[in-house]
């Protein structure tokens, strides 16, 4: 919304048309998101990500948000949050921020009525705000301010931050990182270990007293040759399951087959490989209570880099027959599509 000027109140196809003769598709891929597509797939709730790029990792010449100092990071992340506030203010019939359990319950009630055809208009999409990379928090105690502003989930890392190691930049939790987790726990916030280094993720699972998730991570064991610490090792997945966490699986081709381009390109990557990841987590857990959808859509890639059955987010329901073919029953499928994430929100959003 900020870097590319995308209007998600419109359709994914309108966004693609507007960007057709610009450098954006080559830079970020063609959009997978739009409000009509959310409606088509019955997407009731998304995690709305706050993210800014460390200046040291800026590549190319495209003008994007980035930061070098804690204050610049703070300002950048605040601009992200303001973008969601504007989206909900300008399009209240299409988007709604969800900060509390009563707001969640009211929102789900409207969606249930819509499914039963007693709610005539399409309900808004609910947004729960997630901070990805915690450098925007200038010091650990400032978590309280971000909580007051509506942030409910924090992932301390993208790349390394001053709080812990991250993707491509390994390292442990720092002293400030432990303090950050303690302040988060006092507020009942959800900790997201996606993008944390293997070591700092395990340290967090050992230390954090509150709810832990991995919002968008895959099982490293199913991605031979991936040259980074981006995904979760089996022992981390087991520990996440033991903590009653949920792991959102990413349908990005490179996270399903690292060599997908050399293996024939997009037309060789089916949603079956996405279900492989989901099934792997279920086999480790011994049930279907710890895995969900974590698309990361429009998070740096587009339709060119997802399984060939997926043209937009509207196509996510195409995963259902694949799950049925594997023997998952209706109750299992509902947990994977929504129930597990709803459990996390219901148990952890504040009561007022």
Image (spheres, rainbow, N blue to C red):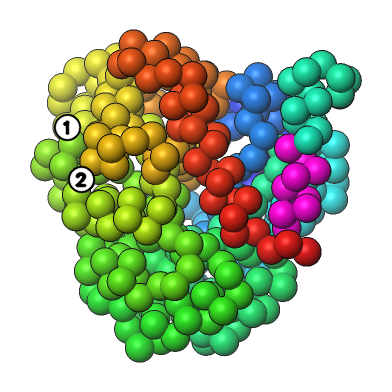
> Which percent across, then down, holds residue 218?
30, 43
> Who's the residue at 34% across and 11% down the image?
325
Report whether 294 appears left or right of 278.
Answer: right
Query: Horizontally, is 89 left or right of 161 in the view?
Result: right
Left or right: residue 60 compared with residue 34:
left
| Residue 220 numbered mark, or none | 2
Report the magenta stretch's main SS: helix
Pick the residue in front: 25 or 79.
Answer: 79
Residue 325 sits inside the magenta stretch: no
Give the Cα separation between the discs numbered 1 and 2.
Answer: 14 Å
Q: Is residue 175 above or below residue 302?
A: below
Which quarter of the picture shows residue 156?
A: bottom left
Q: Residues within 10 Å of mark 2 (few under 14, many from 20)?
A: many
Residue found at the very far left of the displayed protein? 225
Label 1 secondary element: loop
Q: Taking 30 as reference, is 211 above or below it? A: below
Task: Report the side of 102 relative to 282 (left or right).
Answer: right
What's drawn in magenta, residue-wise? 100-108
Label 2 sits on a secondary structure element that is helix
Q: Nearer the viewer, residue 74 or 67?
A: 74
| Residue plotted at (44% across, 26% down) | 332
The answer to whether residue 119 shows anywhere in this view is yes
**x%, y% of residue 143?**
59, 78
* Above or below 35: residue 7: below
Question: Where does the image place residue 171, in percent across and percent down from the top left?
Answer: 23, 74
Q: Quadrant of the C terminus?
A: bottom right
Which residue shows up at 19% across the image and 55% down it? 235
Quarter-of-image position of residue 57: bottom left
| Residue position marked by numbered label 1 in the rendering | 259
Which circle, 1 or 2, is nearer the viewer? 2
Circle number at residue 75: none
């Amino acid at each position: 919304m900020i870097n590319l000027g995308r209007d998600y109140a419109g359709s994914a196809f309108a966004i693609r048309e507007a960007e057709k003769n610009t450098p954006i598709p080559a830079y970020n891929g063609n959009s997978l998101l739009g409000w009509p597509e959310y409606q088509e797939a019955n997407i009731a709730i998304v995690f709305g990500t706050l993210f800014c790029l460390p200046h040291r990792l800026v590549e190319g010449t495209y003008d994007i948000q980035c930061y070098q100092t804690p204050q610049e990071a703070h300002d950048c992340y605040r601009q992200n949050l303001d973008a969601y506030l504007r989206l909900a203010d300008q399009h209240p019939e299409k988007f709604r921020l969800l900060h509390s359990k009563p707001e969640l319950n009211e929102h789900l009630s409207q969606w249930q009525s819509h499914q039963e055809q007693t709610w005539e208009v399409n309900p808004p999409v609910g947004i729960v705000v997630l901070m990805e990379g915690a450098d925007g928090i200038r010091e650990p105690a400032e978590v309280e301010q971000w909580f007051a502003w509506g942030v409910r989930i924090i992932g301390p890392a993208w790349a390394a931050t001053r709080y812990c190691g991250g993707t491509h930049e390994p390292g442990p939790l720092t002293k400030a990182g432990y303090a950050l987790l303690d302040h988060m726990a006092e507020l009942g916030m959800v900790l997201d270990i996606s993008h944390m280094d293997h070591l700092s993720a395990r340290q967090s699972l050992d230390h954090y007293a509150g709810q832990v998730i991995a919002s968008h991570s895959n099982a490293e064991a199913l991605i031979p040759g991936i040259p980074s610490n981006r995904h979760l090792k089996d022992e981390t997945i087991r520990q996440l399951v033991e903590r009653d966490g949920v792991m959102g699986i990413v349908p990005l081709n490179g996270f399903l087959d690292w060599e997908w381009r050399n293996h024939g390109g997009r037309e060789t990557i089916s949603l079956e490989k996405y279900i492989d990841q989901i099934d792997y987590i279920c086999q480790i857990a011994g049930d279907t209570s710890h895995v969900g959808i974590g698309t990361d859509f429009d998070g740096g890639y587009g339709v060119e880099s997802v399984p060939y059955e997926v043209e937009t987010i509207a196509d996510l329901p195409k995963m259902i027959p694949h799950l049925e073919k594997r023997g998952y029953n209706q109750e299992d499928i509902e947990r994977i599509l929504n129930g597990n994430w709803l459990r996390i929100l219901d148990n952890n959003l504040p009561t007022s």
